[in-house]
Image (tube, helix red, strand yellow):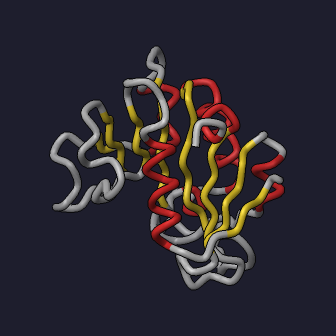
Amino acid sequence: PRTWRSGSMAECHKIVDALINCSPPGTVLDLGCGEAHYTRYQPDCIWVDLLPTENSPASTVVEDIRNIPKIFRHRRFSISVMMDVLEHLPKIDGVILLKELSIKVTDGDVIFCPTGPISVEPESTDPHAHKSAWHPEEFWQLDWQVWEWPTYHRFPGGQIQIGRASCRERV
């Protein structure tokens, strides 16, 4: 199946940890890292955030994640992580970023993104505004797997976690 449902946050965290740790040792790329809840203790991680907080890792690269292809032109990563970030990009920028990650990331991706009808403000200049809504079908077209956790956020349609085929086979 292309979509699995889970009701337990414990299951969610277990699968995310497995996805992040499923590949051979290599660099993890955490985009929009915030406080880096899932990657803070990764031995080889690059954290990127446009608006880091005082609790972000000290070595956070302050950058717009849409510039990843330029700033990491010659780098490859084992795993990429984006937690509640994709919906803050305009749809076309999100699609471009997902395609770029499929080139730069060798073993898989972990993305949390609300699904279903959410309030979007595509023209907003506020970096915290939701600029796009996403649906599982859009990820299926890119050969990504979708897990749904309706209890993760209170958005109608729940929260999804996506991992590309190369990584999900190891979970």
Q: Can you tell which quarter of the image residue 107 is in?
A: top right
Q: Give coordinates of residue 22: x percent, y percent.
A: 48, 36
> In front: 97, or 18?
18
The structure residue drawn at horizontal position 67% and vertical position 60%, both measured from the top left corner, is 147
Q: Give above or below for 133 relative to 161.
A: below
Q: Give coordinates of residue 93: x percent, y percent.
A: 64, 47
Q: Give above or below for 100 relative to 146.
A: above
The structure residue drawn at horizontal position 55% and vertical position 60%, both measured from the top left corner, is 112
> In front: 123, or 74?
74
Q: Give above or below for 89 relative to 29.
A: below
Q: Give above or below for 166 relative to 135.
A: above
Q: Horizontally, is 160 left or right of 36 in the view?
A: right
Q: Give coordinates of residue 157: x percent, y percent.
A: 71, 78
The structure residue drawn at horizontal position 62% and vertical position 82%, both measured from the top left corner, is 155
The structure residue drawn at horizontal position 27% and vertical position 56%, both measured from the top left corner, is 52
Q: What residue occupies the far top of the structure in this picture?
A: 74
> In front: 24, or 117?
24
Q: Horizontally, is 64 left or right of 133 in the view?
A: left
Q: Horizontally, is 164 left or right of 12 in the view?
A: right
Q: Give coordinates of residue 40: x percent, y percent.
A: 26, 48
